[in-house]
Image (cartoon, helix red, strand yellow):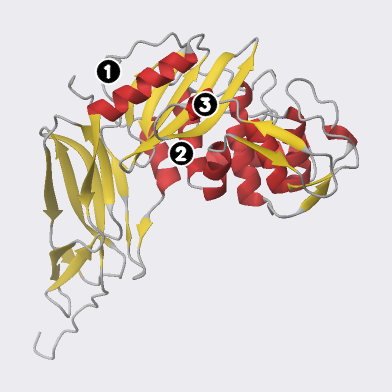
Amino acid sequence: MKKIIVALVLTVLVFSAVMGLFGDNTGVETGVSIVVPAYAGKGGVDTSAAAAVLCDAESGRLLYAESKDTPLPMASTTKIMTAAVAIEYGDVDAVTTIGAEAVGVEGSSVYLTEGERFTVKELLYALLLESGNDAAVALATAVAGDTDSFVKLMNRKAAELGLVSTVFKNPHGLSAEGHYTTAAELAAITAYALRLPLFEEIVSTVSMCLEGEGHAPRYLVNHNKLLRGYKGLIGVKTGYTLAAGRCLVTAARRNGMTLIAVTLNDRRDWEDHTALLDYGFSAFKRVKVCSKGEKAAVPVKGGKKASVLAIGGEDVWICAPTDSEITRLYSVDAVEAPVEKGQGIAKLKVYENGDLVMEIELMAKDAVPTKKKGFLN
């Protein structure tokens, strides 16, 4: 395994936005930051893609990267964000009536007709399995009232995720000037989407028939052919336009480790994704580096108590090379009273073969007020 690059890059921002803070029922949260997000070189995988990444969905850590920050068109992989925003902001059980704006949209289609009625959930299946561009427009209208308002929600979510090289101009991915992303940021969007249970449920569906009231039946078949053969595959989305070339995002889970592979403009995408995922599952392992409720005593200066417990709010895992040695070290210094409950007061540092790869902030379990001074003090 090549020596890892010690650098704080985009993945840190993506990880912080997607993962947020880990919490438990005590109200204490744990902040986590990846210090070494990517590996040097290509990790022994050679793709034909213009840009490609392989990442750990849980931590956001990049395991493979090639031209990861190059802005490129993304074709129908756009619909990953479309679906995620529709699920987050919409009512999936709401029934919407198809308007003229969603009829006859260019490209892949489920042939919606004006006046038909679908639930938002049904349209999500049409969007992600058959890649219906008309379904994308129908969803945008159902959730935000019109396409332009929905696209604003997509771009707002991209900003919330800390993405700096992703701009959406439409909800379907047809070629448009200024509509682009990067391989690394598309992986981050996918990690966000996979945290929505309905999204994973839909993209892992091989085929289904929409037979609800208010519309003609539609038989839908997932375009992702790896679903029919690759062990542990979850989905996610195919895409193609003449300008973007073949684009593909896949995710797979084995032994609790979820990997996301992204290729943009890749004429050999199915073979390359198989190779990327095989590499990830063979060369990396999932290691727990912090347990929920893990404690460290921290001295308190000038407090009513001489010390307070710093705790981890949740289990934290890292995706590490199979041949690596993981070590941990508490970083604890005395803190001045008063101490607030949930205040960051210590760190758990995680090292991989001696290199710092992760810092986990531990929070005060309890508040410690300042000790009142006596008459003679």
- Residue of label 1: 43
Label located before the other in sequence (1 or 3)? 1
In the displayed structure, 6 sits above or below 338; it is above
- Residue of label 2: 191
Q: Assign the N terminus to one quadrant of the image.
A: top left
Residue 321 at x, y = what percent?
20, 30
Distance CA(mark 2)–CA(mark 3): 17 Å
Q: Is residue 67 visible?
A: no
Q: Does dot 2 land on a helix, a strand or a loop?
A: helix
Residue 262 at x, y = what percent?
46, 24
Q: Nearer the viewer, residue 364 or 51?
A: 51
Left or right of 15: which side holds 83?
Answer: right
Three-letter amino acid code of the residue under disc 3: Ser
Q: Which mark is residue 299?
A: none
Other residues around mark 2 within 10 Å, as few (<14) / some (14–19) / many (≥20): many
Q: Does dot 3 land on a helix, a strand or a loop?
A: loop
Choose top left, top right, bottom left or bottom right for residue 291: bottom left
- Check if mark 2's residue and mark 1's residue have beta carbons within 8 Å: no
- Residue of label 3: 165
Three-letter amino acid code of the residue under disc 2: Ala
Residue 130 at x, y = what percent?
67, 29
Other residues around mark 1 within 10 Å, as few (<14) / some (14–19) / many (≥20): some
Three-letter amino acid code of the residue under disc 1: Gly
Other residues around mark 3 within 10 Å, as few (<14) / some (14–19) / many (≥20): some
